[in-house]
Amino acid sequence: MARLSGFERLTSVDEALSTFLSRLKSRVLKAVQVSIHDALERVLAEDVVADRDLPPFDRSAVDGYAVRAQDTFEASQSNPKVLRLTEADEIFANEAKEIWTGNQLTKGSDAVVMLEHAKKTEKGIELKNPVTPRENVSRRGEDISKGEVAMEAGTRLKPHHVGMLAALGMSHVKVTRKPKVAVLATGNELVNPGEEPGPGQVIDVNRLVLSGMCSELGAEPLDLGTVKDDIDEIDAKIRRGLREADLTVTTGGTSVGYADLVPLAVNKLGAPGIIVHGVSMRPGMPTALAAVGDKPIILLSGYPVAAITGFEVFARPIILKMLGVEREPRPMLEARLTRRVASALGRRVFLRVYTFEKNGRFHAEPVRVKGSGVLSTMTKANGYVVIPENREGLEEGELVVVHLFDRVGG
Amino acid sequence: MARLSGFERLTSVDEALSTFLSRLKSRVLKAVQVSIHDALERVLAEDVVADRDLPPFDRSAVDGYAVRAQDTFEASQSNPKVLRLTEADEIFANEAKEIWTGNQLTKGSDAVVMLEHAKKTEKGIELKNPVTPRENVSRRGEDISKGEVAMEAGTRLKPHHVGMLAALGMSHVKVTRKPKVAVLATGNELVNPGEEPGPGQVIDVNRLVLSGMCSELGAEPLDLGTVKDDIDEIDAKIRRGLREADLTVTTGGTSVGYADLVPLAVNKLGAPGIIVHGVSMRPGMPTALAAVGDKPIILLSGYPVAAITGFEVFARPIILKMLGVEREPRPMLEARLTRRVASALGRRVFLRVYTFEKNGRFHAEPVRVKGSGVLSTMTKANGYVVIPENREGLEEGELVVVHLFDRVGG
């Protein structure tokens, strides 16, 4: 009966993830067309190839005078060159025309003299310095040239990317459909947020937290609600997840005791069923990874921090794959650990830290943990450090990589 | 006539910002009540004080058996202790009761023996090791205790913060009203996104980009459209911004040439008018900062990258102040510069870089700039490095702090 952590065998994080991914015929979801006004944070479904040059014409980069550079070559402090001002649409030898930033370069000109480098006189403008051809000119196509790949498929569209789409004349763009993620919480003790818990009851926070994490990734959460520890109820909810969502995530009922009903329910639903159960990580050890047909199911701990960690490690990469995002780490930061932390060999630890800047250096303070159910260790932290399996802890002052989930303190 | 950069005097970034902020009676916007289901990324308007202990009762942290610790003290490998299993609601001396993770601790018990550390026999359970009082118990209030400040005003609500609100029994929360930011683009040459530009015309991208940056900060953009370089048209639009928005942002028409109409229009609208015009930064030099009464107006360059930089430096801090966010730097990262870059003394340079991880180290590659209007320098970058005024550039291999606006490459 005595089993390590209650599981026959714990799988390493890397092996669990690669086994899981290899069992899924994971493919990028279909593309949908959206207005560029709704494209922020969506993911490009195909490369964007420029159908035009940007800028579309040679234009002035400054306020000043369009000139023929060759007419200025002899200008000097002692012998200023005077050019006649014209208002015609084209300039000829020894002529200049007022031009403003962004204006198309005047026909016949090939350079622009800055306003403050020219003296306006009755005869025209007086130059004491030459300009070279193309000086102060933004050349056609210098930003993007026609036929160039302006942005690649898989790009998460930030404001400047949306600006680039607009600049290329696009009003709509093909982005990946949002993955739909069904979220179910299981447990006899749970009540919904907003309901007052009775004796022995607790408010379920996992659905809200995991739904929020889905939204932040650009997925669409589907709230399956809470169910009691009842295999038929669990079965019915997961069936709905399999039918309506691309990924189903459950919390609770994954440890090896009495309430270990979710794995049982999943295994009844079809092959391959449970693929991995029990991962050598902390928090999140009782995480299970499963699939029914092509549809992945991730069974997370009922403890919020363990659920969040399991989601981060297993659900996040799958959602990103569905979106076609090849690589999207959280913001990272190197910082010095403010104190020693211990960990067990053979287990990957996700250590919550509070990272802050002090005297121009970054420090990471491990958040003291009183229990794995303690959500305040998240609200007091702004990132996590991974302690690898081959380390028995980290040293004070050690340089560590922090994965940020909130702003750096100072 | 010859003036440095066309401006009488350039103001340093720090002086510009502090002068601007000192002229605004900037206060945090009013609070509004929202459902916790709509609270993600909103900003707490007041401290959240726990009205209860979390967890609300002592509970088991594991699957196992609730016991009285004192009954186990003599248990050893050679002399196991046997406890009688009961199904009653309370345990007494030398009794144990099955208990599952998260369950309220059985009355009469003070510790939990893990399932895998007990052997079930006909007589009850056999223990070979003692447990200490409170072992494997999550104690009432260990996460948050009643009366404690769980989260402070000014906190930007991430998924785990929303979870904490739910755990504390809240269904609604007071957050700061979203600042409304009016965005106007000026320029005779502009057409709207989706329209096909004629000869000499360009598509306005600034409104889309800046509106996106507003949304990312949790502000609400108000699109004032584009106007020609006509002082009456500009005047009418800015009046609307002053009336309907908390902050008005314009692009174009801020350099000192013919098209320098926006500052003129602003100065006609009332005191104090233009406060700063011309900032010693690059890009973004022609930025102007103004106010009419209490309402700030930020006049940005028409060049997208200069407009983005001016927004980042001046609009972002003001929006955060309105939200009540004291400090929210972009994610930061120390990286080694891959090559030398030059800059002019006395000017703050915002250098776009592409940051990537290679062999466990972070590197920042300066993006080559062909012109200040070049939006592709943003889409090729994922962050910026600030070159301070007292430096004439940065050295190859120098450790720099990157402010990330996109994911780190690898």
Image (spheres, coloured by chain):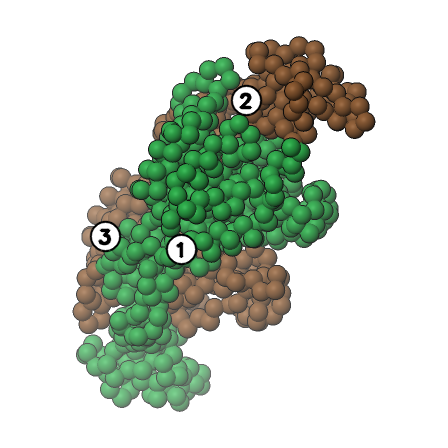
Chain colours: A brown, B green
Q: Is residue B347 left or right of residue A320?
A: right
Mark number displayed over residue B26: 1
Check if mark 3 and mark 1 are on a common chain. no
Q: Which residue position holds label 2? A: A103
Q: In the rendered view, would you say A145 is above or below B254? A: above
Where's residue B251, x and y in %? 47, 34
Tell me the quadrant of the picture where the C terminus of chain B can be found: top right
Q: In the rendered view, would you say A266 is above or below A189? A: above
Where's residue A227, x and y in %? 22, 56
Q: Which residue position holds label 3? A: A225
> Which chain does the residue under circle 3 lie in?
A
SS at badge 3: strand
Which residue is at the front of the view, B56 or B6? B6
Which residue is at the front of the view, A153 or B26? B26
Which residue is at the front of the view, B270 or A403? B270
Proximity of marks 1 and 2: CB atoms separated by less than 8 Å: no
Distance between the alpha carbons at the discs numbered 2 and 3? 59 Å
Amino acid at pointer 1: Ser
Q: Is residue A156 visible?
A: no
